[in-house]
Image (cartoon, rainbow, N blue to C red):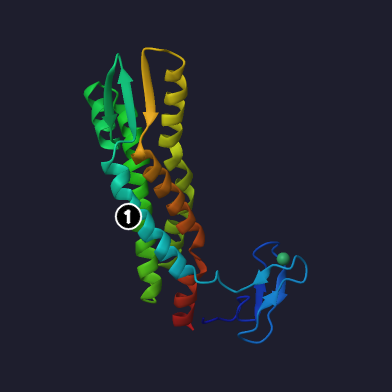
Amino acid sequence: MSAVPGTAAAASCASCHDCGLLCRLPGAGAHAHCPRCGGALHTRKPRSLERTWALVIAAAICYVPANVLPVMRVTSLGKPQADTIMSGVIYFLMHGMWPLAAIVFIASVFVPLLKLVILVGLLISVHRGSSWRPSERTRLYRLTEMIGRWSMVDIFAITILVALVRLGNLATIEAETGAVFFGAVVVLTMLAAESFDPRLIWDRSDARST
Ligand SMILES: [Zn+2]
């Protein structure tokens, strides 16, 4: 890892990930612990790139069945009908409910894909040691963290629908396999964004500027 003057790493210091205490690190290779809370000290999240790659690849794999398999089955007057995310979007569009169609499309198809693309782009840029626009790349990273929670909108919608429709006897709604994969995509991309260390973006560009 490279360090520049003015950073904690350059002064052989690291802040504790658990309690935030700034601690002086012993020699290279030694395992250090925070004197206040006992948490392990490291200047960067350990194995950040490997973990993020693993989670991003797992999320990309789950993204396929999440969109291809049905997410819910509606049985109305004895007639069962299974819906995928896209068939739901098309159904809403055909019935003039375009704001709902837009919400479902953006939250379930567009946002997870955007998150995956941004994370892959950030990972590749760090691997290549890119010094291209670190502030913009950090902003992109913050965006992936911020939009993560909004992908859960669909899972909430399905659970609310299931609960609402259970109250009546005319129709039943059940969550299908696609919803499980969809939930997995949301959780895996959130974990991937969490395991990525945005300071890696600055390490390379700081090293080039000194
Ligand atoms: Zn601590």
Does residue 164 lie above or below 10 as drawn? above
* Relative image position of residue 186 (x, y in whole percent): 43, 47
* Relative image position of residue 65 (x, y in whole percent): 30, 46
| Residue beneath disc 1 | 61
Determine crowd level at label 1: few under 14, some 14-19, many 20+ residues with C-alpha closer than 10 A: few
Of residues 167 and 52, the one drawn nearer to the viewer in this rendering: 167
Does residue 153 lie above or below 39 as drawn? above
* Relative image position of residue 76 (x, y in whole percent): 31, 17
| Residue drawn at x 38%, y 39% as measured from the top left | 179
Mark 1 CB near ligand 1 (8 Å cut) = no
Extreme residue toward the left, this view: 94
Extreme residue toward the front, this view: 78
Extreme residue toward the right, this view: 36
* Relative image position of residue 44 (x, y in whole percent): 56, 72
Q: Is residue 160 left or right of residue 104?
A: right
| Residue drawn at x 61%, y 85% as measured from the top left | 29
Q: Is residue 157 left or right of residue 81?
A: right
Of residues 18 and 9, the one drawn nearer to the viewer in this rendering: 18
Of residues 161 and 34, the one drawn nearer to the viewer in this rendering: 161
Tag count = 1
Determine if residue 15 is in view. Answer: no
Q: Which quarter of the picture shows residue 204? A: bottom left
| Residue drawn at x 73%, y 68% as measured from the top left | 38
Determine if residue 95 is in view. Answer: yes
Q: In this view, does 67 lie to the left or right of 202?
A: left
Ligand 1 rendered quadrant: bottom right
Q: Is mark 1 on a helix, strand or loop?
A: helix
Q: Which quarter of the picture shows residue 98? A: top left
Amino acid type, label 1: Ile
| Residue drawn at x 42%, y 43% as measured from the top left | 183
